[in-house]
Image (cartoon, rainbow, N blue to C red):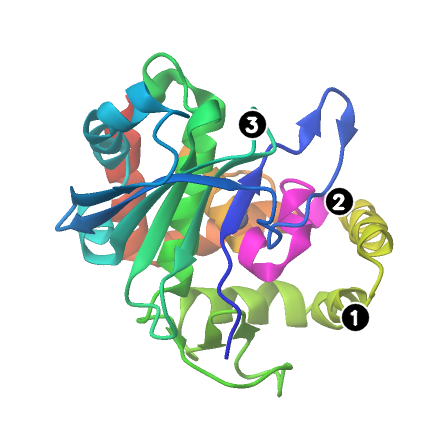
Amino acid sequence: MKKITYFLLMAFLTGQCVSLKQGADDGDLMEIATWTIDNGKLGKVNIIQPEKAENIIENMEETWKAINDILPKKWMRKYVKALELLTDGKDETLAGVKSMDETNKAWAFALDFADLPKGNFKEDTDFLQTLIHEFGHILTLNDSQVAPSDLKFQVDETRYLTNEGLAKTDSYINQFVQQFWYKNDLLSAWDKIQRTKNPNKKLDRLYDFYLTNKTKFHTAYAAESPEEDIAESWYFFVIQDKPTRHLEKDKKVLFFYQFDQLVAMRKEIRSSIR
Ligand SMILES: [Zn+2]
């Protein structure tokens, strides 16, 4: 059985110091409430810790609508089937998504209530980055992109093995990994780091990996895995103007322009946050 974990976006920039956080470890998170989602709308709620976030729970319908106003509606309706309100206090985890079962057809969206912006979501750059990044995981790991698999290790270079299953040949993530990870021999270097048992040593090695390949990654977080790299690159594709430089990280943004569907989604998100 595959371990189901959230792709959590952590606040990893503290002043000048950039540190990588392990995205898969959601052990410190307290669950506050969960909702089912039907056709984009909140359904049944299960309140686990009512005293923690009473006002937030009451206003969640409005909060969820504000989030859906930003992200591509058709896709949110199709894939997001649950909402979880969590917290690990302020900062650290901001939000996350996870596939709800092996099929990758239904996804849960998680929000840390302590990090929800007080004002208009559309004016909060960090929160927007979080939303667009998390949506990037749904976009690149859903059932049209990744097929269930029991494989534990990469088999060959034709199809990249994600935590969600084996990437389909023409999926965005497989094409991305072919072009930017296999070609540069990054995948084998990264794969070696994944085998490091000591978690602190692993983070150090990942950070060194980022520093050695800085022109290839938009952020330190992107160096954590191909899954994070494509989600970060997707965010920069949505938010930035078309790059005119040709560093490897710019090519990762230009990658998305070959897909009309993604260009249309970029347009939809940009017009919603204007
Ligand atoms: Zn992520």
Residue 258 visible in the shown view: no
Q: Are marks 3 and 2 in contact (CB under 8 Å)?
A: no
**Drawn side of residue 23 relative to residue 196, left or right:** left
For mark 3, what is the residue?
89
Of label 1 and label 3, which has the lower sequence position? Answer: 3
Location of the C terminus by quadrant is top left
Where residue 208 appears, x then y in whole percent? 85, 49
Of label 2 and label 1, which has the lower sequence position? Answer: 1
**Drawn side of residue 146 relative to residue 213, left or right:** left
Q: Nearer the viewer, residue 148 or 199?
A: 199
Give me the disc on residue 195. Answer: 1
* Magenta stretch secondary structure, dominant: helix
Q: Quadrant of residue 186?
A: bottom right
Q: Which residues are magenta?
A: 214-229
Where residue 123 appears, x then y in whole percent? 37, 16
Residue situated furthest top in the rendering: 119
For mark 2, what is the residue?
214
Q: Nearer the viewer, residue 174 or 6?
A: 6
Where residue 122 appears, x then y in whole percent? 33, 21
Of label 3 and label 2, which has the lower sequence position? Answer: 3
Residue 226 counted in the magenta span: yes
